[in-house]
Amino acid sequence: MSAGIEEVLRPLAPQVLGALIRRYGHFDACEDAVQEALLAAAVQWPGEGVPDNPRGWLITVAARRLTDELRSDSARARRETTVAAQLPAAGFVAPPADADGPEHDDTLTLLFLCCHPSLSAPSQVALTLRAVGGLTTAEIARAFFVPEATMAQRISRAKARIKATGTTFAMPPATEWDERLAVVLHVLYLTFNEGYTASSGPELQRGELTAEAIRLVRAVHRLLPGDGEVTGLLALMLLTDARRPARTGAGGALIPLAEQDRSAWLAEPLREGLDLIAGALSSTTLGPYQLQAAIAAVHDEAATAEDTDWRQIDALYQLLEKVAPNPMVTLNRAIAVAMVQGPEAGLTLLAPLDEDDRMRRHHRLDAVRAHLLEMAGDTAAARDAYLRAARRTTSTPEERYLQGRAARLKP
């Protein structure tokens, strides 16, 4: 498939899938039909040209494939009613007459469906990447280092679970809106984080995941441009991803923020992220994504690591601890506190995290403690902490970086 055709098809895929599910139900069958329509487009459009209404073309082709398949299934099951009469009975809402108009976009509804609260977080992420992101099951399996068959079962169970709940393909009621949108944003946040710093494996970054997370948040932002947290999450992703070219060196070696060549940062996403967060902070109630984006902005606006305004970062982390208390927030704040008040103050802030079951065995706690111990001049303890962190991480680039930090310190 040519890059140009793929750029047209990728954002249309979730819209077409959403339109079919809304009209017919049958998540699996709709997904198969959409994939066939996308394949047909990839074959025909390069020679015949992109149609005037590519979305309508895809919906028409996919609907024909789907109804053919369902009529075949219906005949095998000896049903006497027509497919059209059967499909709305599957528990899905029939669309209004103009639901497939050129301005209608089912992407957000599909995101809400994939992030159904009955699903576990891993299942929400997997289903979102498959149905909305358009990644193949094999690509998702590789991203999370599980066998393709395992990922296929996870996605299949997620679809079956949604079907069992009797959920309609429609936006949730107003009483559930905030909670469900929060789940959607959290899933996209997790997806981006996994792509930006892979939790395991030989590569530090997985570009297909960060790119999909940014693309999907952009889709939500287009539909909800006035939501501060949607804007904040998009800004956070852009400001973070702007550093991507400077994060790795020869052989994929990890380069920490303080040592990165800032001239290699991507200028366009950096400018866009700064503009987005400036607007969000001035017009809405602060939420966790806005505050994280503000912290990223302070880092990115510093010409050098030495110019970083750590007092402002500490103040933002204090706000974040109040808005969304979390041990990872405390862990990150400890670095800012150490830069402002000295490493001993940062180490004091870390101490209570040793009692947190979620953090006690996490390699980042050891890594941050090692860094602060090194700042304090306790090289022996720092070396031991770096080595503990290296043993606990499942990321090869992080393991090598941490071992390298330990090797620089004499035992």
Image (cartoon, rainbow, N blue to C red):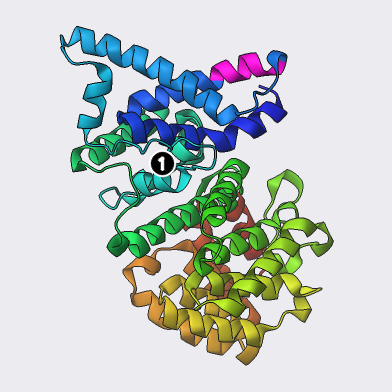
Q: What type is the residue that disc 1 sits on?
A: Ala
Screen quadrant of the N terminus: top right
Left or right: 364 in relation to 117: right
Position above or below: 144 against 231: above
Q: Which residue is mark 1?
A: 126
Quarter containing the C terminus: bottom right
Bounds of the magenta segment: 39-46
- Is residue 166 at least partly visible in the picture? yes
For the image, the number of numbered tags is 1
Q: Residue drawn at (29%, 57%), measured in percent from left and top?
A: 173
* Residue 40 among magenta residues: yes
Residue at 48 percent of width and 26 percent of height: 59
Q: Main secondary structure of the magenta part?
A: helix
At 64% across and 85% down in the image, what residue appears? 312
Percent across and percent down for residue 120 are 30, 49
Is 59 inside the magenta-drawn segment? no
Q: Is residue 124 left or right of residue 284?
A: left
Q: Residue at x 41, y 15 (%)?
A: 65
Q: Please tell me whether mark 1 sits on a helix, a strand or a loop.
A: helix
Query: x, y (%) of residue 402?
Result: 60, 60
The front one of 320 and 170 is: 170
x then y, percent, for residue 168: 27, 42
Residue found at the very far front of the displayed protein: 97
| Location of residue 67 in the rendering, given as x and y in whole percent from the top left corner | 35, 17
